[in-house]
Image (tube, rainbow, N blue to C red):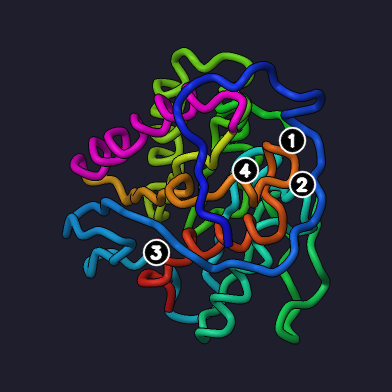
Amino acid sequence: MGSTTATAGSGGQAPAGATTGSSGEGTGASTSTSASATSSGSGTGGGSPDPGFQPCPETGPCKVLPLGDSITFGLGFDGGYRVELFHLAHQDGHEITFTGTQQMNGPAMVDGAQFPRNHEGISGETIQQIANRVPTPALRDMPHIVLLHAGTNDMVSSANGADARLGALLDELIAEAPDALIVVSSIIPLPFAASSVNTFNAAIPGLVEERASAGAHIIFADQFAGFPTSELGDQVHPNQAGYARMAGVWYEAIEGYLR
């Protein structure tokens, strides 16, 4: 698996169709993870749970809402990171399902179990457009866990103020889903807008820490660190290996909360 990552500095103009283009499937799969977290209450990191907070029910599946843009939708690999995330949870005996109102995609079965093909990822959407879907329709089926990867399209259209817009979205999610665990990640590399990505990503842990310190059930997962550009199928969307890597980071962040 490659080890190069996007670095600071602009890389020219966006390729045609950058925000919505599809990518080729990668070969193999990686579950290499690099996640850090800040949770309310205990202040523990690395995805470790706050022992006083249990978002998932004692019986039945834990409902996970994948929220974001085309990377959440899974352009480039049918089902995106959700396929490997379901596999990781299933192999460890955790029962999860995915919620969301957008066009279902992904395989019919994973590990011999029916794969939940729901999600709330829409190609080309900015942070504000994602926020416009909260609470309706995104939270129509109230989730126990929200996985938020948002901001890639802002780097293309208007990077200035993206951190403030993300903060407002986090506040809305906290207000509308106060009993859910909100997992917000840095965005994966976008080589042609690397400087903007670095600036945006640097602000996210502080946004999370501020809200966790105020009592919100929110943690940070680092989807950028260690993500090689070789796992971008079209310089925007992950290939299969890249989506598997994302799944590993999400799983490391939430595994301690699953039953």
Cβ–Cβ under 8 Å for marks 2 and 1: yes
Q: Read off the residue under disc 2.
A: 75
- Residue 203 location, x and y as percent? 34, 29
Q: Read off the residue under disc 3.
A: 55
Q: Residue at x 58, y 81 (%)?
A: 90
Q: Residue at x 55, y 49 (%)?
A: 228
Q: Which mark is residue 138?
A: 4
Indicate the amino acid at tag 3.
Pro
Q: Residues within 10 Å of mark 4 (few under 14, many from 20)?
A: many
Q: Read off the residue under disc 1.
A: 123
Indicate the amino acid at tag 4.
Ala
Q: State how far apart marks 1 and 3 are (Cα).
A: 29 Å
Cβ–Cβ under 8 Å for marks 3 and 4: no
Magenta span has 202? yes
Q: State how far apart marks 1 and 4 are (Cα).
A: 15 Å
Cβ–Cβ under 8 Å for marks 1 and 3: no
Cβ–Cβ under 8 Å for marks 4 and 2: no
